[in-house]
Amino acid sequence: MAGHHFQQGPFDIPEVSDFVPRRLKPWLFIFLVLIIQFSGGVYLAAATDMVGSTALMQQDILMAGYASIIGLAINFAVMFRIKFRFSTRTQLVVSGMVLIAANIICAHTTSVPVLVGTCFVAGWFRMQATLACNSTIQLWLTPVRDMAIFFCYVYLVVDSAIQLSGIATVYTAFFSQWEYMHWIMIGLLVLMIVVVLVLVRPARPPMYIPLLGIDWIGGGLWAGFMLSFTFVCVYGNYFDWWESREICLATLICVACLALNLWRATFLHHPYISLRALTNRNVVRATAVYIVFFTCMATEHVFEHSYAAAILGFDETNLIDLNWYVFAGIVVGCWFTYVTFALRKWRYKTMTAIAFALAAVYLAYFYFMIDYGVEKEMLFVPLFVRGAASVIISIVFLTSVVQSGLSFQEFPKALTVNGFTGAVMGAVFGPALVGEWLSHTVAKNASLLGSAMTDFNTAICHIPLGNLYGMVQLQALVVSMKEIYGWLLIVALVSFTVICLSYSPVRPWAIFPKWRTIRRTLRRMVMREETKTKVVSMKK
């Protein structure tokens, strides 16, 4: 995208008031981005408490949580346009106000459409505020604009915030009520707005770029596709898949939105997501790797909570303490990727092989270890490895999108595709597949174990029928988990072997263009749209 760009002189942020020490200015924005990342529509760690105190189901809360991620992903395609339309101060203040409203609504509403819509909007503004902060300190993090370095910081902040917010939410609910987490975040967001109003100047962007030429209809259709796809995966098992009208209707909407988007992309000059971005080699490769990798890791969503709660007997606080193990893996994974991938420029192939090797370790550990008497400390290794593997694969393939050869007009569109396939599809498709697989495997193993134990009980033990049924179901669950872990381990090992046997000399060299270059590029695009609009109006 560009050559080397070295920062001249000590780093400074002119938008921040001069009485703030120069060295503290970047840390101010890191503080703000942490508040933004902690805030959201719903807090999935409080799902159990929300189900118990509202009329909502577990699926409703999951759908709202994923709607927030979809709103975040949809924003990628236009986030730079908004950045160059409004000042950093305006973006942060407006986003903070929207997130405050979202927290108030989500703490009180029991309407699923309202909850999902609120979380979608909250995700959109959370992404815009995050960009406003991170883009401000980008040159402080990497003066040469090396995106491999920048993404290590991004995932360290984002993934760590997910784990830490879960811990904070559960302990808040444990000591008081789950709604208090929303009020704590409202207080922090108010603090953020006050800090921004006091310390950040209302400086306008150097070049005013109006929001012309954006395919808002396409954005709505892509949001419809992503939401309906997520609905099918989240509610599929509950509604018995395509035996129900709800899943059939959602599938129809999903296919229709996708078909309309692809059709519109064939003739629109600036579709929300272009065919060039969809068919880019690096984007397609990243999508394929995400599907395989996160399907292998889908046991995180399907098995771990059931295993720790139903079999090991952990309560909510012991369950959430496991997040510390994942957090440690994320920190070490980001550090390892920074040293090897960002600084030493290890190949994409090498880093992908390492991620799949760690995934195989995670699956193998559970396959051989899963039992009734596992101590909490014994779960450190698999959860640590899972956190490291996930963050490595995410940083590596997000960097590959930057290095895909797409022009800057197409690059944000590729980020939207990457955000959906990596964050949304990775979180819903694999768990839906593995969850359905588990239900069929448990039924099969319960039938086999039940007949054997019934004969043994009739002959010798004479255990009450209710107790015997519980023992059969528990044993069937353990056996089924072990069986699925084994199959997924085989998939991970085969993927690792294929990666090792392939040849790819490509090393990361993803350099972000200068901000003034981006402004000029966007300005030229808008000027073409303005000229086109004038010509059309003159013809009329």
Image (tube, rainbow, N blue to C red):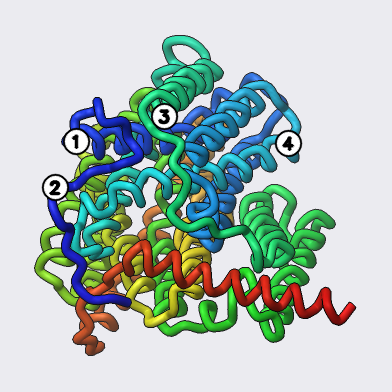
Whole-number angstrom distance, CA of label 3 to CA of label 1: 16 Å
The answer to whether residue 441 is seen in the rendering is no
- Residue at the extreme top of the image, as rendered: 176
- Bin the neighbour count of mark 3 within 10 Å (Cα to Cα): few under 14, some 14-19, many 20 and up: many
| Secondary structure state at the residue bearing disc 3 | helix
Q: Between disc 3 and disc 1, whose residue precedes?
A: 1
Q: Position of residue 10 (x, y in %)?
A: 14, 47
Residue where numbered disc 1 is placed: 22
Cβ–Cβ under 8 Å for marks 1 and 2 = yes
Q: Amino acid at mark 4?
A: Val
The residue under the point 49% across, 51% down is 449
- Residue at the extreme right of the image, as rendered: 540
Residue where numbered disc 4 is placed: 114
Q: Amino acid at mark 3?
A: Val
Whole-number angstrom distance, CA of label 4 to CA of label 1: 43 Å
Residue where numbered disc 3 is placed: 196
The label on residue 10 is 2
| Secondary structure state at the residue bearing disc 1 | helix
Please state if 428 lies on the left or on the right of 326 as rendered.
Answer: right
Q: Amino acid at mark 2?
A: Pro
Q: Between disc 1 and disc 2, whose residue precedes?
A: 2
Q: Is residue 169 above or below residue 133?
A: above
The answer to whether residue 536 is seen in the rendering is yes
